[in-house]
Image: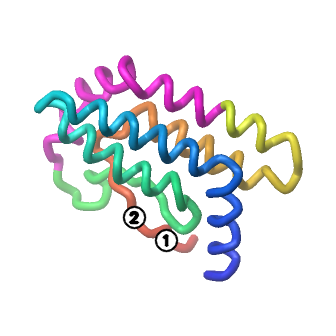
Amino acid sequence: MALLRLIFNIAWFILGGFIMGLAWWLAGLLCFISIIGIPFGRACFVIGEMTFWPFGQESRNRKNITGIEDFGTGPLGMIGNIVWFLLFGIWLAIGHIGHALACFVSIIGIPFGIQHLKLALLSLTPIGQTVTAKTSG
């Protein structure tokens, strides 16, 4: 299973994952311009890394993992997600959806298109999410 995941990740990286990972990192650099944006920027780099190698990783809500509401999973996180959506989220989602549509053209590209759709959903509301190793099941 690990070999298959490696093959998929390498193919993903070559066929569009590199471009979208760089887009996430660019958004992160733009967030670092202001002090308020630093937590957003850090999240962009984590999600950007996931975008480079998505197979074997998943995003999960921190509250579901820890059972505790924190800064990002509460009302302030919701406000942050709204600001994020308006500034960066919609553009990253459009990029992922465009790549997904291109991947769905062929049968071989379907798993890659599915990953792009998952990342498009994550790009809409990333605050309060964490990247973890994918659990089986």
Instruction: Locate residue 24, reporting x and y percent.
Output: 43, 41
Element class at badge 2: strand
The one nearer the camera, 90 or 72, is 90
Residue under the point 68% across and 38% down = 99
- Which labelled disc corresponds to residue 135? 1
Q: CA distance from mark 1 to mark 2?
A: 8 Å
Q: State how many labels appear.
A: 2
Q: Magenta stretch?
A: 69-97
The quadrant holding residue 100 is top right
Instruction: Identify residue type, mark 1.
Output: Thr
Q: In what quadrant of the picture does the C terminus appear? A: bottom right
Is 1 left or right of 52, judged from the image as shown? right
Element class at badge 1: loop
Residue under the point 16% across and 28% down = 34
Residue under the point 44% across and 69% down = 133
Q: Main secondary structure of the magenta part?
A: helix
Judged from this view, the residue extending furthest toward the right is: 106
| Mark 1 vs 2: CB contact within 8 A | yes
Instruction: Identify residue type, mark 2.
Output: Thr
The quadrant holding residue 68 is bottom left
Instruction: Locate residue 120, reporting x and y percent.
Output: 54, 37
Name the residue carrying label 2: 132
